[in-house]
Amino acid sequence: MASTRTGNRRTRVHVVSDVHGNARDLARAGDGADALICLGDLVLFLDYADHSRGIFPDLFGKENADRIVELRTARRFAEAREFGARLWGGIGTDRAAAIEKAVRRQYEELFAAFPTPTYATYGNVDMPQLWQEYARPGTTVLDGQRVEIGGWTFGFVGGGLRTPMRTPYEIGDEEYAAKIEAVGEVDVLCTHIPPEVPELVYDTVARRFERGSRALLDAIRRTRPRYALFGHVHQPLARRMRIGATECVNVGHFAGTGTPWALEW
């Protein structure tokens, strides 16, 4: 992977999101690019397409994974939490410690797969407190911050907003809006979650609206970046949409496709 530099030559970046344990393809995601951008969700807790994969089935088996997916898909979140609590109560180990141990195993493999340079922000299922332990030289972690790549300014805002799913890195609307404000005017605005537009937040397979950000939508309209890049919604109704001067792009479900989205200028 080449290092980023300005001049007459064109710059190419590859962008991934929702990696969910796909270390094999992640190791090749930067091939042919000047930089890799990762928009988070490295951890695979439960694969909704293959219930045998992830931390949850490793601990409790596929049949229990089938059941919790059924409950969550039906939006029976209280029942799902009660069911999960019974499972955790039956294994005789601390829930937080067991999850952190499994996440650490995944992070060790995934961060080792990042090429140089990589610019990354957190997804809603990530554990930010662990990232600095695993980020190697050449990987820059950004959240509410900016960086220049090939003469363009990129802003990064990680995490998701609060939902009944209660994933690890969900924050309040005001805290999220403050990070958007801190980034300010940029050429490319990189977030994990999409702006709050129905076509961008509706998942056609899960058949539900995911949480998007109104503050992000307002910032796109106000600051008019060239691009707004995001992931989070695995099977969106619309993968891209123009909002004023800004091209909004869901860069894809990397765990499923293994293919990065490319931006060149």
Image (cartoon, rainbow, N blue to C red):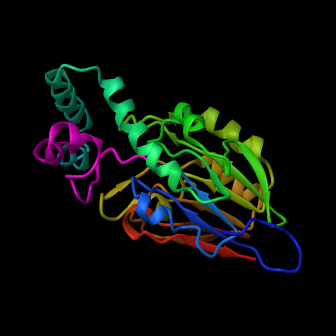
Q: Is residue 194 left or right of residue 217?
A: left
Q: Residue at coordinates 47% horizontally, 70% vertically from top-left?
A: 238
Q: Nearer the viewer, residue 137 or 78?
A: 137
Quadrant position of the N terminus in the picture: bottom right
Q: Judge whether residue 253 can be spotted in this image.
A: no
Percent position (x, y) of residue 163?
Answer: 41, 38
Q: Is residue 159 left or right of residue 263?
A: left
Task: Pick out the residue farthest to the left.
Answer: 63
Residue 61 is covered by the magenta coloring? yes
Q: Nearer the viewer, residue 4 or 120?
A: 4
Task: Pick out the residue farthest to the right.
Answer: 7
Percent position (x, y) of residue 130?
Answer: 52, 33
Q: Is residue 130 left or right of residue 65?
A: right
Q: Residue at coordinates 74% horizontally, 44% vertically from top-left?
A: 145
Quarter of the view holding residue 221: bottom right
Residue 116 is covered by the magenta coloring? no
**What's the magenta region?**
43-68
Q: Residue at coordinates 37% horizontally, 66% vertically from top-left?
A: 256
Q: Is residue 252 left or right of residue 69?
A: right
Quadrant position of the C terminus in the picture: bottom right
Judge whether 157 appears above or below 190 on screen: above
Q: Judge whether residue 140 can be spotted in this image.
A: yes
